[in-house]
Amino acid sequence: MATEPLSGIRVLDLTNVLAGPYCCYQLALMGAEVIKVERPEGGDLARVLGADPDRNKAGMGISFLAQNADKKSVTLDMKSAKGKALLKRLVQTADVLVENFRPGVMDRLGLGYEVLRAENANLIYCAISGFGQDGPRRKDPAYDQIVQGLSGVMSITGSPDTAPYRVGYPLADTVGGLTAAFAISAALNANPRGVFLDIAMSEAVISTMGWVVSNYLVGGVLPGAHGNENTTSAPSGTFATADNPINIAANRDEQWQALVQHLGREDLLQNSDYATREDRKRNRHSLREDLEATLRTRPSSEWVNELNALGVPTGQVLTVPEALSDEQLAGRGLIGSLSVHGEEMKLAGSPVVMDGQRRMPRTSPPPLGADNAAIWLELGLSSAEIDELKKEGVI
């Protein structure tokens, strides 16, 4: 079994911050050789982002560490004539190039797809942007929260009293990055390979909103913010207990019946407001109050164990630290340890398990320009030429 399906694939990562770096990190975890091409002055902006000021000062911010293991780093001033020439030489050796500049930037640099395709006809060129390479918003900034707002996500997040609300992590960046990694993986299977991939974060997000979008387009139902309620069924949502909230998804009639019977609330089966699935959906708020009157009498862990045993899907609502320490996650090894410049650090591996094996990062996120000598020597430059390029600020 090939545990590194992208072994032998070279990816040039010209990206910054999150969507592009996350995409390329997934490719690296699958075995691709990923070379970050960074600005000589500071490199990827994520190097100075994160919750630890000292790491930021050192150019190894937590935001950078999170998705740049298993990569190499070279520095290159792509505005200079020598820098452009070096990138073209590097492209000749690559299978994939990923960039997340605003549309048109690479063309203005004289390094757009048509120019680079002339250097390598089989190049898979992936451009990640907020809204795509054309259209009236093509040059709008691709910040995650901006994309969340313009894609409609914020309008359906939160409750009717609190919406619009942003999703609590960079959803658009991450979904955009995953979409790009998927597209690149598909393009690698094509023959011939050369292609231009136009990935819009907004479109990637809207694509994941399948039911919400279809309910509007097909059913004419205006999407809204419903808090923790699952609008397709009831009781299906978040419920209070004696300590912590739990999620219950009693979507089928037999699950609804098992739930109320276990709670000793058979009287609810006789209530005409809850007689059918549609009745329960219409009266979901009063139904929650009726159920919580009993659920609040005992702790969440007891309800979770008992209801799941009865076939009523139930789960605790965990904090991030609780989720990371949960025996289910911990037992499957998503989080691994890696020595990062002498410091033991925990990082997430690939979310994919292949034949029982999970690909974990093996090399540290690189210091800025750590692989300059090795990569540029490989391209045929001499040590003297590399030293001269450094003096000139090209690398």
Image (tube, rainbow, N blue to C red):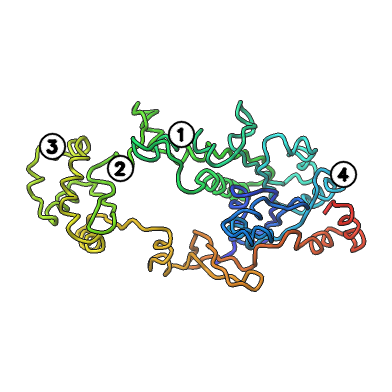
Which residue has dot 3 on it?
Answer: 273
Quadrant hosting residue 375: bottom right
Q: Is residue 142 above or below residue 41?
A: above
- If you read the primary sequence from the N terminus, does the residue marked by circle 4 or circle 3 appear first? 4
Q: Is the residue marked by circle 2 packed among few (<14), some (14-19), or many (20+) residues within 10 Å? A: some
What's the distance in space between the residues labelled 4 and 3, CA to CA?
74 Å
Residue 147 appears left or right of 275: right
What's the distance in space between the residues labelled 3 and 1, CA to CA?
33 Å
Which residue has dot 2 on it?
Answer: 230
| Three-letter code, disc 2 | Asn
Quadrant hosting residue 246: bottom left
Q: Is the residue marked by circle 1 packed among few (<14), some (14-19), or many (20+) residues within 10 Å? A: some
Closer-to-camera residue (256/145): 145
Name the residue: 83% across, 48% down. Answer: 83
| Secondary structure under the numbered disc 2 in the rendered image | loop
What's the distance in space between the residues labelled 4 and 2, CA to CA?
56 Å
Residue lying farthest to the front in this orientation: 53
Quadrant hosting residue 311: bottom left
Which residue has dot 4 on it?
Answer: 81
Closer-to-camera residue (242/394): 242
Circles 4 and 2, Cβ within 8 Å, touching? The answer is no
| Secondary structure under the numbered disc 3 in the rendered image | helix
- If you read the primary sequence from the N terminus, does the residue marked by circle 3 or circle 1 appear first? 1
- The percent position of residue 235, horizontal first and vertical second, equals 22, 45
Q: Is residue 53 above or below residue 156?
A: below
Which residue has dot 1 on it?
Answer: 152
Quadrant containing the N terminus is: bottom right
| Secondary structure under the numbered disc 4 in the rendered image | helix
What's the distance in space between the residues labelled 4 and 1, CA to CA?
42 Å
